[in-house]
Image (tube, coloured by chain):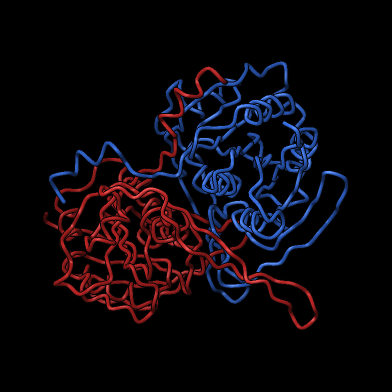
Chain colours: A blue, B red
Amino acid sequence: MNEKPLILITNDDGVKAPGIRALINYIRPFGRVVVVAPDRPQSGTAHAVTIAHPLRLELLSKEEDYEEYCCNGTPADCVKLAFKIVMRRRPDFLFSGINHGTNASINIIYSGTMAAVLEGALAGVPSVGFSLNNYSLNADFGPSEQFIKSIAANVISQGLPEGVCLNVNIPDISVEKIAGIRLCRQAAGTWQEDFDEREDPNGRKYYWMKGVYVHVGNGEDTDQWAVEHNYVAVVPVQFDLTAGKALELLRNRF
Amino acid sequence: MNEKPLILITNDDGVKAPGIRALINYIRPFGRVVVVAPDRPQSGTAHAVTIAHPLRLELLSKEEDYEEYCCNGTPADCVKLAFKIVMRRRPDFLFSGINHGTNASINIIYSGTMAAVLEGALAGVPSVGFSLNNYSLNADFGPSEQFIKSIAANVISQGLPEGVCLNVNIPDISVEKIAGIRLCRQAAGTWQEDFDEREDPNGRKYYWMKGVYVHVGNGEDTDQWAVEHNYVAVVPVQFDLTAGKALELLRNRF
């Protein structure tokens, strides 16, 4: 390749989160990097897009082969603005994360990190989301470095199948304990929500959402199993939600 | 069935939208209905959940076999609150909509209406989302009545396969022109975004998102084709995003 690839980096924890700072450091050697990330945490925004109010972009820094912006929108907004306004073209690759917390199993459907990745894939850009299995802002991203670099190099040199992006989940353990990289399918699981019921000073009730993740199925070929068994889990992801097997089951009913 | 089924109704256009008022009218004859819907429009919120601020519920009306609440959260929040706080159990069925605007093809991934449906399916509740292919608040929901009632009766009497929910899209045409109900897969498509670039009174730039839907593939077995050819499109939907075919393609790379 004559020219360095153009790479977009984003996340959902906001431009100041340690996870995206680590990812920027790992990815910058691979090409020209443009960061467009939310100006504040946007966890749990999923694939939300902002249509009811205007979006703003702020240039935070500019160096050789590097530009960094924040945006008042969601991760999906960041990607759309990056393509159309900041870069005025589709980048060659998109990397999102490193998310503070798992996006394995069903967590993908709530994930802003992975929504950004799906936006990339929808536009035909090879795109990968990285998540560390630790929600803390003080998580240690060091052990993820060599695996993120290896997966990024793999995707930059070979691309990805059309319409497919990657959901990469990294266990929160020291580097010597990581067993390797494992290609997986998405595990079945669900969140068992509960709500803290409280009263405000005026006697009106309000509710805080909380919940625990519950395994439903968890074969050895799933991402949840892999992360729990010290593997970096790589799931190829698509945006076709058709339940193919159900098409036959329902054929005679509609 | 001895007892009337317990049915949750929600949407993403807000509790006052004409679409949900129509759906409530169509579904009430089938059982005990509880409505928990957003207190204002939440289009484009996708599967967002509210974890950074508290949620509130407001009882709007209560009659025999009918209760109606609004909530300051997203459609997914509404479903979670309905299950845990309002009903204190899972309902027997969940219906979401009628959405003002299409959720066929790729629109499903941005849809709050369908996020509510996926939440139901995740909890094991047979769940269906209805959308009319007209974004106007003045859309005519009349032609949809017989098809919605027929699909609801079908699901209430026979249930749905585990982990499968339905995305139903209805063409915006008179009832005599509707060609029937057609089981489909999700069409491939994308949104080609553009942004209106403007300046505020202080000379700072801001952007309004706008876009047009672009077909990518559109076989006769897809929802987009069906709606464009006057059919009510029914797509069975799952929440496993694994790109199964890519697992083999990528096997030797990771």
Q: Quadrant of residue A52?
A: bottom right
**Is A98 placed above or below A157 here?**
below
Could you tell me if residue B237 is visible in this image?
yes
Between A149 and B79, the one nearer to me in the picture: A149
Question: Please, which residue is most extreme toward the front here?
Answer: A2
Between A181 and A55, the one nearer to me in the picture: A55
Task: State the image coordinates of residue A225 (x, y, percent, origin top left).
Answer: 50, 25
Task: State the image coordinates of residue B44 (x, y, percent, origin top left).
Answer: 49, 63
Task: State the image coordinates of residue B118 (x, y, percent, origin top left).
Answer: 38, 50
Q: Residue at x 21, y 64 (%)?
A: B148
**Is A92 placed above or below B195 here?**
above
Q: Quadrant of residue B31?
A: bottom left
Q: Which residue is drawn at 81% across and 59% down?
A: A59
Between A57 and B50, the one nearer to me in the picture: A57
Task: State the image coordinates of residue A92 (x, y, percent, origin top left).
Answer: 65, 41
**Is A159 placed above or below A220 here?**
below
Question: Please, which residue is most extreme toward the right here?
Answer: A63
Could you tell me if residue B125 is visible in this image?
no
Q: Residue at x 61, y 56 (%)?
A: A80
Q: Which quadrant is the N terminus of chain A positioned in?
A: top right
Badge count: 0
Q: In this view, does A34 lie to the left or right of A167?
A: right
Q: Is residue B65 left or right of residue A39?
A: left
Q: Quadrant of residue B19?
A: bottom left
**Is B146 placed above or below A138 here?**
below
